[in-house]
Amino acid sequence: MISDLKDVDGVFKNLQYAYTFKDTTIYGGILSGDFVFAYRDYDVGFDDSWGRDEEMKVTYGLFQNSQRLDLIWNNILVSSEDSISANIVRGFNLTITFNPTDIVRIDGRVNLTLRKDPASNKWAISKWVDESNF
């Protein structure tokens, strides 16, 4: 079921739905306009980031080039929330099936900063820090 994003848990439900059904419309709906994705580039040994447009291109490519995506949310490790912002650190398991002989499994954590839009009362991700070792 697609959430109405009126609570933080709805963002996680929609994220899981977007991956399961490879739906970029739902995915785009949970990202704020000033969204930033940050990660550690282990090949070069430093942190890097990109904005919402690049995130949508990368995710579209993943959705188009995979046969199946299985995202499982694990325990919430850190949670702080007030009426307009939240920070959630949560474990996940992601299995990406490109084809029957090319399956990638990623176990990691997401560190999400979320904001609630006062006009729509909906939560969106403003920053995603990937804390996996992939």
Image (spheres, rainbow, N blue to C red):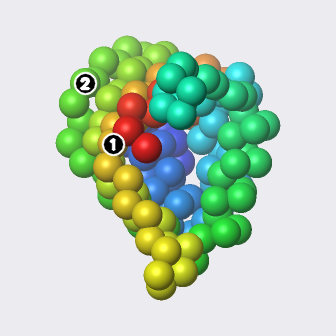
Closer to the camera: disc 1 or disc 2? 1
Q: Which residue is mark 2?
A: 78
Name the side, left or right, on which 128 lies relative to 63: left
Q: Looking at the image, which is closer to me, 66 or 103? A: 103
Position of residue 8 measured from the top left corner of the image (x, y, whole percent): 41, 35
Q: Tell me which residue sits at (72%, 28%) in the image.
A: 51
Name the residue at the bottom extreme. 100
* Residue 108 marker: 1
What is the residue that sits farthest to the front in this orientation?
Answer: 44
Q: Secondary structure at mark 2?
A: strand
What residue do we see at 64% from left, 64% from top? 63
Q: Is residue 117 visible?
A: no
Kind of residue sitting beneath label 2:
Val
Identified by mark 1, the residue type is Gly
Q: Earlier in the sequence, mark 1 or mark 2?
A: 2
Foreground pick, 53 / 30: 53
Q: Is residue 33 visible?
A: yes
Q: CA distance from mark 1 to mark 2?
A: 14 Å
Residue drawn at the location 75% of the way across and 38% of the way down: 54
Image quadrant where residue 91 sits: top left
Few, some or many C-alpha atoms within 10 Å of disc 2 (few <14, some 14-19, many ≥20)? few
